Image: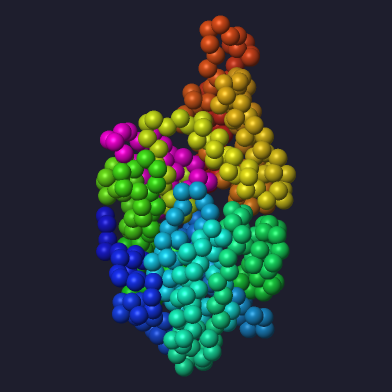
Amino acid sequence: MPVTPVLSSRWSLPESWTLATYERADGYAGLRQALAMGPDDLIKLVKDSGLRGRGGAGFPTGMKWGFIPQGDGKPHYLVINADEGEPGTCKDAPLMMADPHSLIEGVIIASYAVRANNAYIYVRGELIHAARRLRAAVGEAYEAGYLGHDILGSGFSLDLVVHSGAGAYICGEETALLDSLEGRRGQPRLRPPFPATNGLYNSPTVVNNVETIATVPFIVRGGVEWFRSMGTERSPGPKIYSLSGHVTRPGQYECPMGTTLRELLDMAGGIRGGRELKAWTPGGSSTPMLTAEHLDVPLDFDSVMQAGSLLGTAALMIMDDTTEMLPVVRRLTEFYAHESCGKCTPCREGTSWMVKILSRMERGDGDAQDVATLSDACDNIFGRAFCALADGAVSPIQSGIKFFRGEFLPVVPADKPRAAPADTAPTDTDDGAPQSGDALAGAH
C-alpha cells in the first residue's frame, strides 16, 4: 500500500537541493533534536526503530553503530557508500541530486552518535552532477554552522569531505572502498578484522549507504512508533524501489517495506505494451532472478530470501516475454568479469571462463555438457572469494538455468549430429543444475 512520501517528499519542490528550500521543509530540525540527546540514546533510538541497511545486506543499522568501541583513544570515522554501481540500481543518485541536505543532516547525526569528527561521502566517479550538488550543499552547511567547529553551539565538531571514486564496481564493497579512500587500489580486505574496529586508517569506522543515512533524520523527528507504522515487523520503514526495464513508467517508487511487485507494477502502469512478465530481479543484477510466480512476494529482506533471492538494493529489473535469457545472462556475466578486481582466483578466472562458455552457447556452438559445466563452475565460485562480487556473478547463471533451462540447452539442426550421444546428455535429474539452484536459494 503506498504511503505519503518520506525520503522523496522534497524531490518535487522548486530548487529542492538548496539549503533555503530544505530549511523551509523542516530541514535540520532533526539535527537540533539529536544534539539535545546523548550519543548512546541516539544509537538506541535507531536500534529500536529497526532500521536495516538499504545498501543491500539489510544489516541492522543501530547494531552496526553499537559495534564501534568507545573510549579507545582512536579517531572514529563515518563513511557513506555512494558508489552506486549495481546494474539496475538508481536510487541514491536521484536522492543526492534532489535532496543532498537530507544526506548531510543524516551524516551529522550519525557522526555525533558514533563520536566521529570526520566523515566522508564516497561518490561513484560517473555521478558527476550528484557530486557537484553534494559539494555545493556541503559548502552551504558549513556557512550555516551545521558543519565545522562547535555545531550549533553543541560542542560537537565535524568535517565532511565528498570524495569521487574512479568508477570501479568493486569499490562498492565496503573494505575495497576504504582502501580506495586511503589512496590505494580498491580491493577487498580479508576479514576479520572488521571496519568497526579496523576500518579507515586502521581506526573504528561505520560504513553506511546513502539511503540508510538519509532515513535517520526522519526517525529522529518522527520517532520509533511512527517509523514502525510502515513496512513489516522485521523490515520496518519506507523504501525506495527502482523499477527499470520493460515497464510502462520506470522510475523510483517509495513505498513501505513489504510492498509486492504486483502493487509496484500497478503504480508503474504494468508491463510495457500489455505483455506478460517473464523474469525480474528483486535487488539488481547480483540477486537471483525470479519469475511471474513471485509477483506477490513481499519485497522485504526476509520474504525475498525465503523466495530464493535477495532484496539487495531493491532494484527491480523487469523482463517481459520477448526476452531471451541466454543473451541477458551472458551480458551480466561479462559485466562481472570486467569488474572483477582480480585479487582472488575463483572470481578472476571463473567469470572469464563462464563468459566464454556462454558466448559459445549464444553463437550456437554449445554442446550438451555446457549446462553441467556452468553449474559446476558456479558451485566452485560461490562462497569461495574475498567478497560478494563472485557470488553475484553466479546468480544470473544459476537462476537462469533454474527457471529457463530449455533456453540454455543446445538447439541442433536435424542435419547436424549432437556433440554427445542422446543417452549421455544431461537431464533434469543427472546434471546437478536444479540442485545447484536449490542450493543457491538455501545458501542465501
Residue at (54, 40) in percent of width and height? 332
Residue at (60, 12) in percent of width and height? 418
Identify whether 129 is placed above or below 40: above
Residue at (62, 48) in percent of width and height? 339
The boundaries of the magenta stretch are 272-301
**62, 247: nearer the viewer:** 247
Does residue 169 appear left or right of residue 46 in this picture? right
Q: Position of residue 33 (x, y in %)?
A: 39, 84
In the rendered view of the protein, which quadrant contains the N terminus?
bottom left
Residue at (44, 66) in percent of width and height? 96
Q: Residue 3 falls in which quadrant of the image? A: bottom left
Does residue 91 appear left or right of residue 276 in this picture? right
Q: Position of residue 370 (x, y in %)?
A: 61, 25
Q: Is residue 46 visible?
A: no
Count of picture labels? 0
Residue extending furthest top? 415
Q: Position of residue 356 (x, y in %)?
A: 64, 31
Does residue 162 appear left or right of residue 354 in this picture? left
Q: Position of residue 369 (x, y in %)?
A: 62, 22
Identify whether 9 is placed above or below 262: below
294 falls in the magenta region: yes
82 falls in the magenta region: no
Q: Is residue 366 visible?
A: yes
Q: Residue 324 falls in which quadrant of the image? A: top left
Identify whether 156 is placed above or below 299: below
* Colour scheme employed for the rendering of this structure: rainbow
